Image: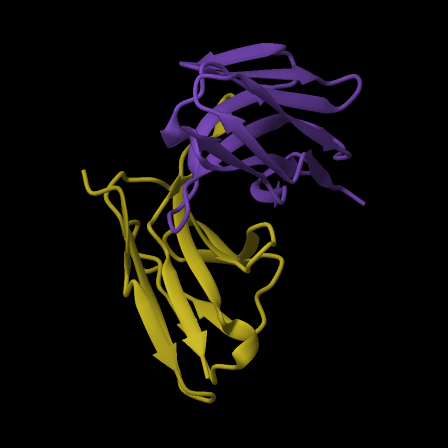
């Protein structure tokens, strides 16, 4: 199993450009998440999905869009990139158990907007 | 406001020594508490998940404790190794919602030879 994979690993964007961060998981998990992590800050939830076709906003959704057409894939779209979106982006997936769910993270995408 | 606070912010210890990291939370209702380890430049990795009825949970050299009455948790690392150098993050679901987690800022641990 590859687990959670993310592409690209690094990207530099100019202000106003758009891009899609790719995320895929091969564990058949229902739940998927997108987080951003800024230096010295805790992870912030951008969007999450509870299954194919179902997404919902997290704490910091502005400037981002998501879709989930399959169980495996959960891309994050940045429209009109801004310097404030410079961050490390992590995708995660999980499944529910009676004790809570363990989230499995991808390696991250480091994005710089100049 | 639901919050997760960790101490110390950073810690330096010698290889082979033990250490204890602290987490205080003010989240209600409470369902579970997680500890994650994040190596520099990598995604977090789960160490433990504790429900409100559990007091202690071990994962190898890592032992987590939970006091739901005082809303405190600790992570004890025994016989530290160089590979334990990482950030250790305490995480609690916001108002019991497992989809929306409150992530602490982490304790940055450096284990020196």
- According to the rendering, which colour does chain A have? yellow
Figure disc tally: 0
Q: Nearer the viewer, residue A39 or A3?
A: A39
Q: Nearer the viewer, residue B41 or B85?
A: B85
Q: Nearer the viewer, residue B6 or A59?
A: B6
Residue at the (55%, 54%) spot, across then down = A45
In the displayed structure, A35 sits above or below B26; it is: below
Residue at the (66%, 22%) spot, across then down = B73
Residue A11 at x, y = what percent? Answer: 33, 73
Residue A96 at x, y = what percent? Answer: 45, 31
Where is the N terminus of chain A found, in terms of image quarters?
A: top left
**Quadrant location of residue A69?**
bottom left
In the displayed structure, A64 sits above or below A13; it is: above
Relative to B113, B30 lies left or right: right
- According to the rendering, which colour does chain B have? purple
Relative to A79, B53 lies left or right: right
Specify how the rendered protein is coloured: by chain
Q: In the image as oriented, which residue stretches furthest toward the front? A: B113
**Quadrant location of residue A26?**
top left
Residue A63 at x, y = what percent? Answer: 54, 75
Q: Nearer the viewer, residue B15 or A29?
A: B15
Residue B38 at x, y = what percent? Answer: 45, 40
Q: Is residue A78 visible?
A: no
Q: Is residue A100 visible?
A: yes
Relative to A85, B113 lies left or right: left
Residue at the (41%, 41%) spot, across then down = B39
Residue at the (44%, 17%) spot, across then down = B16
């Amino acid at each position: 199993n590859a687990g959670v994979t993310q592409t690209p690993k690094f990207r530099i964007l100019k202000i106003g450009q758009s891009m899609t961060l790719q995320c895929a998981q091969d564990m058949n998990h229902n739940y998927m998440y997108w987080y951003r992590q800024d230096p010295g800050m805790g992870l912030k939830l951008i969007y999450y999905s509870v299954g194919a076709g179902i997404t919902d906003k997290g704490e910091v959704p502005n400037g981002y869009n998501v879709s989930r057409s399959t169980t495996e894939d959960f891309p994050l779209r940045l429209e009109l990139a801004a310097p404030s979106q410079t961050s490390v982006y992590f995708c995660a997936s999980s499944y529910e158990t009676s004790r809570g769910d363990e989230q499995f993270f991808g390696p991250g995408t480091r994005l710089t907007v100049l | 406001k639901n919050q997760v606070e960790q101490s110390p912010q950073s810690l330096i210890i010698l290889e082979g020594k033990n250490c204890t990291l602290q987490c205080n939370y003010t989240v209600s209702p409470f369902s579970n508490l997680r500890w994650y380890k994040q190596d520099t430049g990598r995604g977090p990795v789960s160490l433990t998940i504790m429900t409100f009825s559990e007091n202690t949970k071990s994962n190898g050299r890592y032992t987590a404790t939970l006091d739901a009455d005082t809303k405190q948790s600790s992570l004890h690392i025994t016989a530290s190794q160089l590979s334990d150098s990482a950030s250790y993050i305490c995480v609690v679901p916001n108002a019991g919602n497992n989809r929306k987690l409150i992530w602490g800022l982490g304790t940055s641990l450096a284990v020196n030879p």
